[in-house]
Amino acid sequence: MAKYVYNLNYSKFDGSSFLSNIRENSTHHKGFVTLQRQFLSDICKRKKKPMFSVDEGMTEMRDAVSCKRILLVLDDVDSRDQLDALLEMKDLLYPGSKVIVTTRNKRLLRPFDVHKLYEFEALNRDESVELLSWHAFGQDCPIKGFEVCSEQVAIHCGGLPLALEVLGATLAGRNIDIWRSTIQKLETIPNHQILKKLAISYESLEDDHDKNLFLHLACFFIGKDRDLVIAILNRCNFYTVIGIENLVDRNFVKISESNRLIMHQMIRDMGRDIVRQESPMEPGKRSRLWRSKDSYNVLIQNLATQTIQGIILDMDMLKENDIIRSSFSPIDFKKHKTKNFLNYPNPQRGQWHLSDAKEVTNELVLETVVFEKMQKLRLLQFDHVELQGSFDVFPKRLRWLRWSELQLECMPIDFPLESLVVIELQRSRLRKIWHGVKVC
């Protein structure tokens, strides 16, 4: 976008310079000096001459901008040092000069007298298909037979130009079967090239605190009320108010008019893939389990580890996907009560359909012992799940429990409620918290 604006307008000025990829180029040897030399060469129309320090470059830049109208674009700025080296002469700009700065961190612009702040808006569906088509087919619309797949890819990209360009180039010249297979893969594993570029922003976050907060939001709290999230995560040793503000400044998350957290789906996928890469083949060793299928397999096979901080398990969602992989056949499952199926001896490996289990129950019943190793568990979301067994082994420091369709009329007296900040029991049969007296 900045390059497009620059190309339309540079001829209207006495001098112009487009300094691209400043974040990356400034890290090279004498990066700031190299960028200053490029600016002076562009503005003064001369060969790049030797320069030995940033201070020397600043002096020459002051002289260069004081007598002519210039257009300057600083692309992908991500630190105050970069602005100090390249925009220190801003007060000496000749009347009518224009400076455009692109950044992933709008907080950097606050000390400056910014005339207008423009936040990029996602492309609509038609614009997305057009941009995808230019990169995939070399024209402004899909070729015959690729219309539906093109629209599916465009929807997946959520209006993000970077994603549309990368996927368009990746799928260029491929047959329709490759397009369909790619679309199916994207539902589970996002495109690596896109994630690699988006991850630059993640790595630029100030510290591990903001990185971990972002991962929590991406896995568990999209669409949740901001105040609710703050209440929960403050008790998980986060400084949530300033952390969310930092993420808003860097466009990782937005706050809706109804005070809910919003995140672009590609940013969400990037965060979740960072968690997935912690242990690509063994979900039980990851810090967060947000996919019900992964949670299901980890829990029924008792593969959880102490690294897990949060889990989502929605049995309704798994039913919609029809097949759940298990180590039990449909016949074996029907012959035994659901409450004992995790302990069934000598199981026959295979698959069972949730529709085959409806005669028994709509709930999945887990033994509490499968949670024994998860002493770092803070966030737990269940839908259509029952627990049985002693809660003495259950994680004692849960902060958030969301348990929909709970079938119990009272909580077990040994259930560890003491550390909970928020408990949500939508559509439950609960009549009272527990029987008798509980001593804390």
Image (cartoon, rainbow, N blue to C red):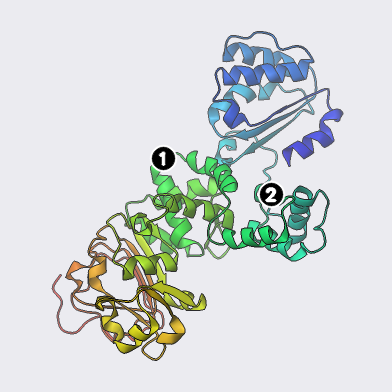
Q: Nearer the viewer, residue 134 or 355?
A: 355
Disc 1: which residue? 207
**Which disc number belongs to residue 433?**
none
Q: How many marks do you count on the picture?
A: 2
Q: Nearer the viewer, residue 267 or 136?
A: 136
Q: Nearer the viewer, residue 397 or 135?
A: 135
Is residue 132 found left or right of 158 in the rendered image? right
- Quadrant in which the C terminus appears: bottom left
- Crowding at mark 1 (Cα within 10 Å: few <14, some 14-19, many 20+): few
- Crowding at mark 2 (Cα within 10 Å: few <14, some 14-19, many 20+): some
Whichever of labels 1 and 2 marks the residue nearer the N terminus, that label is: 2
Disc 2: which residue? 161
Is residue 417 found left or right of 201 in the rendered image? left
Is residue 363 found left or right of 172 in the rendered image? left
Q: Is residue 264 visible?
A: no
Hey, what amino acid is under mark 1?
Asp
